[in-house]
Amino acid sequence: MRIILGSISTVLTGVILTLAVRWVSLRSGLIARPRDDRWHRKPTALLGGVAIHLAFLTGYLAFGPRLSAFYPILAMGTLLFVAGLVDDMVQIRPYAKLIIQLVAAGVVVFYGLRLPWTSHQAINDFITIFWLVGMTNALNLLDNMDGLAAGISVISSIFIATTFIVNGQAALAAIPVLLGASVLGFLMFNFSPATIFMGDCGSMFLGFVLAGTALLSEYGRFSNLTAVLLTPVLIMVIPIFDTCVVVASRILSGRPISQGGRDHTSHRIVALGTSERRAVAMLYLFAAFSGFLALMVRVLETSVVLVLIPIFALLVISLGFYLGKVHVYEDGDRPGLSGKTIVRSLTDFPYKRRVFEVMLDALLVALAYYGAYLLRWDGGFSGEQVSIFLKTLPLMIVIQMAFLLIGGVYRGLWRYMDIDDLLVVVKSVLAGTAAAGLVVFVMYWFRGPSRAVFLLDILLLMSFIAASRLSFRIMRSLIVGRTRSHPDAVPVLIYGAGDAGALLVRELLNNPSHHYAPVGFIDDDNSKAGKLIHGYRIFGSREVSQAVSSLGVSEILISSAKVPDCKVDDLRRMGISPRKLRIRIE
């Protein structure tokens, strides 16, 4: 009951303080003005971090546990809050902020808080300092779109609190709960369209305190080492992921890492054609899923985690590659790479895509084989089966990769993968597994290895390779849905609901540079009216005027040369102004 009362009180305090700080910021001129390297497009009040800090401090003093281990975190978080406040007002140099962050992290480590990732204290101290400083800057970078950093902080607080409760540290759970409550009061005014920003004072304070609070977990109560290593990383995966994407893209484009820009994860999602709110909501869901996985890691067997985490990591990496391809700068804003660097060498390597595919498939072969053993032996295998698995795994990888190569899997392009390409994968996997299975059974004289393992391996490997090839298409469908692929896209109807029309729709959806957004089809065959192709409705030839007016169509694309000229003339004679209807023959 105490923690519920404290949460409600802290949220209300955050609301009141945010209103007060917003009024003071607007009256005193402490506002964030639009800039080319910033996302917002109107002057917005700053210093929302003051409301967050004061609301949390008030809530903690009134309802929080008196824990001496948390005092260094709170004190150093306050130090970074002050440094961020000064930076919001007069700006201080990046290296000065970094020095202050290192000092704050060093003090926390000095008082005995560290991540127990290795058996060497000195290494753990270094890792913990890197963790605290890295997460402080990661959340600072994440504060790039209305409601994003604040919402992710609330979600992270919830999962850190849940971890404490699961660990039996219920009293400590009040700390992240109160922190999340203080941010929630601010988030009500920061979600799109935001009327106040938290500023560096808020993002640096939140990043440091969240990362520091994660250190309070009693990792000795975790059931396996993987939980110790992965729990804090999974809970904070969104700031980590965004930082990696930003750093990599800025290095590749020759931009300073410390310079602001519109190249964050959220900006890239919006550039794909979705709305700002949808982009933030999707990152919220991603953070919630990752936090749930962090909880699952604690209760699952290590053998199961060793499959789930690599699959999740591959999903994250694939998402990073997909978003990394999104064009977020104009050509004039993207200076070329200079100097002979490792990044430049990798960029110039002509077969880097094929090398990546081969490495990915080798990993998928290993995961499928390992997963087949887990499924066959009900989540765990030991003794003789472990020996068989370890001895035959290199053999499985070599033989499967050879058959994937011989079968022609690496001749196709992911972007244009279709049923024929999937059949090539199926044939290659079947042949590879059959050959590998025969060799394994001969090695053991048909005693020991399980036949069911190889049947399961076929199903898993087919699924993994097919999913990897279709991943970019699936991501686009999930992220963009059926929204327009470009903000300036022109809504169009497609004349001809046949094979050519279906191909034209796919071309328009896959290439935003055309600046066309399909909204439906027209066909002379009225029996097709009302049916769907790729989710778009087919209109009969008698419904053209109605479709044009209701859908706001400005162009009709002719997808087939079989459409007679008289039909095109009929479209022009409908009484629609040429400004509203322009005929484009494909």
Image (spheres, helix red, strand yellow):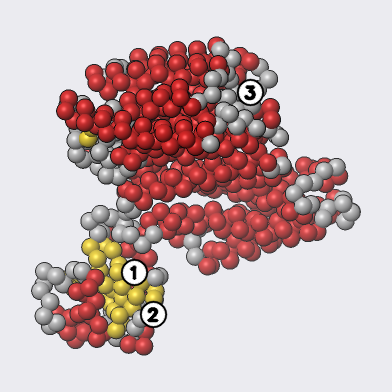
* Type of amino acid under label 1: Leu
- Label 1 or label 2, whichever comes before in sequence order: 1
- In this rendering, is residue 183 above or below 555? above
Query: For this rendering, which residue is in front, 15 or 404?
Result: 15
Give residue 550's quadrant in the image: bottom left
Image side of residue 459 versus residue 350, left or right: right
| Residue 251 visible in the shown view | no
- Label 3 or label 2, whichever comes before in sequence order: 3
Which residue sits at x=77%, y=52%? 378
Residue that badge 1 annotates? 504
- In this rendering, is residue 13 above or below 474? above
Q: Which mark is residue 188?
A: none
Image side of residue 61 versus residue 577, left or right: right
- What x and y, as percent, mark residue 80? 39, 19
Query: For this rendering, which residue is in front, 582 or 565?
Result: 582
| Nearer mark to the viewer, of 3 and 2 | 3
Disc 1 vs disc 2: Cβ atoms closer than 8 Å? no
Which residue sits at x=25%, y=54%? 487
- What x and y, as percent, mark residue 477? 42, 58
Residue that badge 2 annotates? 531
Element under disc 3: loop
Element under disc 1: helix
Residue that badge 3 annotates? 116
Element under disc 2: loop
Image side of residue 405 versus residue 183, left or right: right
Disc 3 vs disc 1: Cβ atoms closer than 8 Å? no
Image side of residue 500 versus residue 437, left or right: left
Query: How packed is label 1: few (under 14 Cα within 10 Å), some, or many (20 or more)?
Result: many
Q: Quadrant of the C terminus?
A: bottom left
How far apart in space, not on screen, are marks 3 and 1 (Cα)?
56 Å
